[in-house]
Image: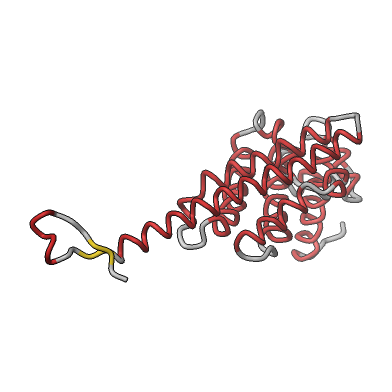
Amino acid sequence: MVRYTKEHKEETRRRIITTAGRRLKRNGIDGSGVATLMKDAGLTNGTFYAYFPSKDHLVATAVADQMRAQHASIVAQAAPGRAGLEQIVRWYFSPEQRDNIEDGCPNAALLDEIARSTDPTRQAYTDGALVLIDGFAARLAPHDPPSARLRALGLLGMLAGTLQLSRALTDRQLADQLLEQGVRNALALLDDEHTECVAAATDVAGDTACQTSPHALGRGERTRTP
């Protein structure tokens, strides 16, 4: 019997996870059987249980890996602030990203099935999504990222939903126009957020610049210092 090193087994497991993630995005969770997942990795069906206790376990692991990869390769590489968010939006709504399902966003490819999946798979997705939206929030509100978390989650929903619809349409021209409109909608949302942040910052600065006038103490008035 051939005995493999620990490193070899870990490399093989990593290959199974990577190829499974691509297959799941292309064929879906229900449409990807263990035999197909193992064949993609260049292995036989019988060796599966040497690496994973069940298909559900592999799915949860692959989903977590896909979410980490998207953050590392796209979100973490984007510029700070609004410029970085615009980079992300334009990449996300590119025809190339839409058409390359295997190497594209796991959100748009798997969301509907993840909602019906096991708790570990949903938790793996949730953990990954929170990392993504924290990256969005840090660019939406650099001085107070937690305050922008829900808005960042809304942006993620807009991105995934629009991409899903564009992929579903058989009319290529309409599908492309939808992506273009998606860019405009997302950038408008970012501009609205930027305006609100500037206004809030101005209000705070204005409040700190106010002092009580000695001549207005009796009237409870405040004057603004130059």
Q: Residue 48 at what x, y percent from top left?
A: 80, 44
Rendered position, 219 above or below 49: below
Q: Quadrant of the N terminus?
A: bottom right
31 displayed left or right of 137: right
Outermost residue on the left side: it is 218
**Nearer-the-camera pick, 66 or 104:** 104
Residue 37: image quadrant is top right
Point 70% across, 31% down: residue: 112
Q: How many marks?
A: 0
Front residue (pair 221, 141): 221
Instruction: Indicate whether 220 appears above or below 8.
Output: above
* Residue in the picture at 62% in, 59% down: 82
Q: Which residue appears at 43% of the width and 59% of the height?
A: 201
Left or right: 152 in relation to 12 = left
The residue lying furthest to the bottom in this view is: 226
Q: Residue furthest front?
A: 215
Instruction: Give the residue at x 85% y 30%.
Output: 169
Residue 15: x and y in percent read 82, 55
User: Relative to the observer, which residue lies in front, 99 or 46?
Assistant: 99
User: Residue 64 at what x, y percent from top left?
Assistant: 67, 49
Residue 200 image position (x, y, % from top left): 43, 54
In the image, 132: left or right of 37? left
